[in-house]
Image (cartoon, grey):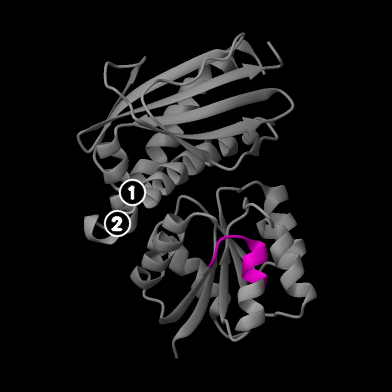
Amino acid sequence: MTVEAAVDVGAILADSFRENIEMMFGLPLEGPEEGSGDGQMTMSGMVGLGGPEFRGLLQIACTDRGARKLAATLLGGEEMLGDDPAMIADGLGELANLVGGAIKRRLDEGGGNIELSLPSVLEGEGNLLGVSNSERVTLRWIVDGELVETSLVYTINGS
Amino acid sequence: MAIKVLLVDDSAVMRKVLTRALRQAGLDVGDILEAGDGSEAIGVLENDPSVDLILCDWNMPNMNGPDFVAAARAKGYEMPIVMVTTEAGNERVQQALDAGANGFVTKPFTPDKLGEALEKILQPA
């Protein structure tokens, strides 16, 4: 991959997130803006992407309220969600899986040959763990009034 | 006649999304069985082989989608199996078809897209 491809990672992340929010969630979407915001994110869905040249970790972070809204939307409403925190985490993990899959698809079109990990969900304040010698792109969105941050930490060709 | 569907996905939320999408697509769906991975799905089939349609994810713990498809076919289960997954590359599609899947729906999907794909597979030959 070239330096130009590294710049395109932000566009790939944006397109992948937007596509899934629009098609699977149907929620109003504003953004993206680059960089982290001041919001205290309390839940993160994460998925790994690994290929011969590209290795990355996708994080989708939001507040508890944002995660609840996303899960409720997937399920068809608050009444379908109930009070099960596991379902809220599952919904955020599934969003990370969906967006990771869309990123994978786009990278594979350029010969990325990417494998996707199973998603995981972290709870607690704080941003993505740093990875040394890696690039990072963070995009902020407003999804139906809730702040959501999408971050992709990645290396290309082991650089 | 209402069809019995087995949903195989490690995400409980996605299984509910699929349940809702199947009904929104207008399919005549009766009982819906669920499994969190391929190994569990084999167990469900052994208990109730009268399933008419299986929707199956790709990446799952214990037994992934393609391995489940191959195992189900090896055990003689012949009902249609449709992969519903973020995996969309030509090689993956071919891998699933070679294992014995009947079709492929890429996530993200709309109920209409899911319904169109399933109607083609469920139509009598």
Of helix, strand and loop, which one carries label 2?
helix
Left or right of A53? Residue A154 is left
Instruction: Name the residue nearer the viewer: B124 or B84.
Output: B84
Counting residues from the N terminus, which is met first, the one under dot 2 or under dot 1?
Answer: 1
Q: Which residue is mark 2?
A: A81
Q: Position of residue A21 (x, y in %)?
A: 35, 42
Q: Neighbour class for label 2 at 10 Å: few (<14), some, many (≥20)?
A: some
Report if the CB atoms under discs 2 and 1 are less than 8 Å apart. yes
Q: Which residue: 67% across, 18% down?
A: A1
What's the chain of the residue with tag 2? A
Q: Position of residue B4 (x, y in %)?
A: 50, 81
| Residue B53 visible in rendering | yes
Real-space CA distance between mark 2 and mark 1, rounded to the nearest whole angstrom:
7 Å
Image quadrant in which you'd find residue A157:
top right
Instruction: Name the residue nearer the viewer: A85 or B68.
Output: A85
Q: Which mark is residue A71?
A: 1
Q: Which residue: 67% across, 64% down?
A: B39
Q: In the figure, A27 relative to B79: above or below?
A: above
Q: In the figure, A137 relative to A103: above or below?
A: above
| Residue B80 visible in rendering | no
Magenta highlight range? B35-42
Q: Is residue B91 in the magenta section?
A: no
What's the chain of the residue with tag 1? A
Q: Which residue: 52% across, 20% down?
A: A8
Q: Position of residue A47 (x, y in %)?
A: 54, 35
Disc 2 residue type? Leu
Q: Which mark is residue B95?
A: none
Left or right of A74? Residue B93 is right
